[in-house]
Image (tube, helix red, strand yellow):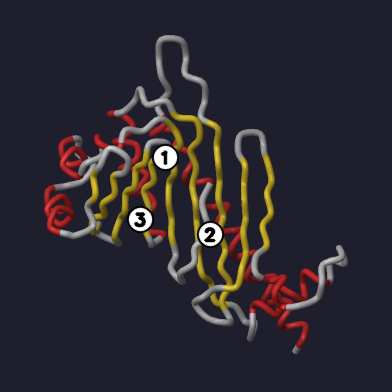
Amino acid sequence: MAEIQTTAADAFSIVIVGAMNPRIHHPQWYRTIGAIDEAELQSTLSGASVLITAMVSQFQFPAAEAAIAINCIPDRWTIQTNTDSTWERIANVAARVFEKLSETPCTIYGFNTQKHVKTEAPNVKDTMATAIAEMQLGFPIGRSLASAVQLQSTEDDRKITVSLQPSLAGESSIFVAYNTEYQAPTAPAGGYFDIGKLIVSKLPEHRERAGAAIQAVVTAINNRILKQR
């Protein structure tokens, strides 16, 4: 659901897939429904990053902890920030927006955590290449095979994708993307489901699992280096 980043910046985002109308998603409308405050609106409107058309809406505003960016195209709405501490704020914005747009047909929603984490490895690419080669699955030995590793698992109500690759932040850092994807429930006859409430209720588990997965990756790399010393 989310593409792997190509810059050395952390990112935390919520994605909702469905039938969107980008023209609705104007900063002034977000202010009207109480999703952002007046200072955030004015900061957004005074910037050069606002684009509202029939096919795309995108803008960003500075929140208390970090900048928040919103992007809407006809089949997808995304809200993203670059600090873990802003998760609850973007979840609350999403909940408010889709409380007002409750009849929007949605098919998928999910969370994306992308972090660059420093390890004890002098060169993460070499460490990853060695670990992959030790699986003895026929991969050629060489640094290029450490360009990316991706694992997917499916549980009762979600699909989890974990992607690993050497980080652009430095040779000792690893980039980890942990994505959780849910199928939106079927709306009852003559009614609708509140996707905002689903987002708020599912977020804590995603944060806990993503944090544990990232810590496990870093611990595994560090343990390999300790054994080599």
Of circles 3 and 2, the one toward us is 2
- State which quarter of the image contains the C terminus: bottom right
Left or right: where does residue 71 sit relative to residue 185? left
Tell me: residue 174, above or below residue 21: below
Of circles 3 and 1, the one toward us is 1
- Tell me if mark 3 has few (under 14), some (14-19) or many (20+) residues whose alpha carbon lies within 10 angstroms of its own: some
Gap between marks 2 and 1 measured at Cα? 17 Å
Label 1, on which residue? 76
Name which of mark 3 and mark 1 comes first in the sequence: 1
Nearest the camera: 222 or 11?
11
The amino acid type of the residue labelled 2 equals Ile
Tell me: residue 51, above or below residue 186: below
Q: Secondary structure at mark 3?
A: helix
Nearest the camera: 95 or 13?
13
Q: Secondary structure at mark 1?
A: strand
Which numbered disc covers residue 4?
A: 2
Name which of mark 2 and mark 1 comes first in the sequence: 2
Tell me: residue 202, above or below residue 3: above
Q: Secondary structure at mark 2?
A: loop
- Tell me if mark 1 has few (under 14), some (14-19) or many (20+) residues whose alpha carbon lies within 10 angstroms of its own: some
Gap between marks 3 and 2 measured at Cα? 20 Å
Name which of mark 3 and mark 2 comes first in the sequence: 2
- The residue drawn where x is 46% and y is 69% is 7
Q: Quadrant of residue 212?
A: bottom right
- The residue drawn where x is 41% and y is 10% is 190
- Tell me if mark 2 has few (under 14), some (14-19) or many (20+) residues whose alpha carbon lies within 10 angstroms of its own: some
Gap between marks 3 and 1 measured at Cα? 21 Å
Label 3, on which residue? 86
